[in-house]
Image: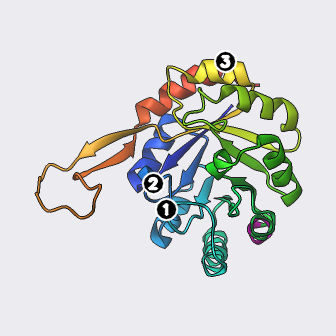
Amino acid sequence: MIVEIAVSTIESVRNAFEGGADRIELCSALPLGGLTPSAGFIEDAVAFGKMPVFAMIRPREGDFIYSDDELKCMLTDIAFSKKAGVHGIVSGVLNDKGEIDFEKTKQLVEASHPLPFTFHRAFDRTTDHHRSAEILIKAGVHRLLTSGMKAGAFEGKDVIRDLQQRYSKQLIILAGAGVNPSNVAKLVSYTGVQEVHLSASLKRKNSHSSKVSMGISDDGSYSVSDSDIVRMIKSETKQFNS
C-alpha cells in the first residue's frame, strides 16, 4: 500500500518521511491545487534522499488548457527536474472541449521518459472517465491521480472503483482529495486501490501578525504536512499491504 504525500515546504518533506510516507509529490501553492516547485526546493528534496520524489509540473493556477508557450515552459521544467534527480513527473493538459489533450500530454510523457508519469486531477474536470482513461493509456501515462470526478475521493469512490476494476492493469489508480485517517480504510476497501494521496497538512500561523497582506488570500498562515497524520494514515492502511 503506497501513501503519497503532497508537500510544499522542506519541513513537510521531513515530516512526511518521519510519518512513514512512501513517496512525496513536490509542489508549490498547495491551496491552488499545486504548481511547479522551485529549482531549489526540487534539489533539496532530492538531496534529502529518503523516499521517491515526484515533481508537479503546472505553470500556473486556473484551468489546464495550456498554450504552446506554456507547454514549452513545462517541457523545460521537466528537463530540469529530471536532471535534478526526481523519480517521477506529475502533470497533464486538457483541451478547450474539456477533454484530455492527447498530443500535448503525450509530449509531456515522452519528455519525462524513462520516469513514470502521473496525470493529475485535471482528469476530474473531464466528463467521461472511461474515454479519458483510455486516452491516458494510449498516451503512455503510468498513473492517474483522481477524486473520481468529485470534490473528494470518498464522494467519488464509485468512479474510482470503476477505474480500478477496468484499467488497473494498464494504469495505476491513485485516489486523492479529502483523504484522511477517518475515511482512508473505507475508501481503500471499497475501491481496491493500492495507492492514496493526501497533503496530511495542518495550518500554521506566523507568530508575527501584520495588517499588510501579500496577496488576496494571504492571512499570514501556511500549511505543513503533519507526521502524526501521515503515521495514522499508514496505520489505517497497513491491513491492505500485499
* Residue 212 placement: quadrant: bottom left
- The residue closer to the viewer here, 48 or 188, is 188
> Is 186 included in the stretch rendered in magenta?
no
177 horizontally vs 13: left or right: right
Please report the bounds of the magenta region as a residue range: 108-112
Give the spatial CA distance, label 3 vs label 1.
Answer: 37 Å
Can you identify the residue that label 1 sits on? 61
Residue 189 drawn above or below residue 155: above
At label 3, the amino acid type is Gln
Amino acid at circle 1: Glu
8 relative to 146 in the view: left or right:
left
Closer to the chain start, of discs 2 and 1, is 2
> In this figure, which colouring scheme has been used for the structure?
rainbow
**Residue that carries the numbered disc 2 in the rendered image:** 32
**Of pointers 3 and 1, the one earlier in the residue sequence:** 1
**Pointer 3 with pointer 1, Cβ within 8 A:** no
Asked if the residue under mark 1 is in contact with the one under mark 2, i.e. CB atoms within 8 Å, the reply is yes
Of the two numbered discs 3 and 1 in the rendering, the one whose residue sits closer to the viewer: 1
As drawn, the label of residue 165 is none
Label 3 sits on a secondary structure element that is helix
Q: Secondary structure at mark 1?
A: loop
User: Which residue position is annotated with label 3?
Assistant: 239
Q: Is 233 or 32 nearer to us in this picture?
A: 32
- The image quadrant where one finds the C terminus is top right
The Cα atoms of the two marked residues, 2 and 1, are separated by 6 Å
Q: Residue at x 60, y 71 (%)?
A: 84
- Position above or below: 145 against 175: below
Up the image or down, 137 lies above or below 96; here it is above
Q: Position of residue 173 (x, y in %)?
A: 74, 39
In the foreground, 201 or 216: 216
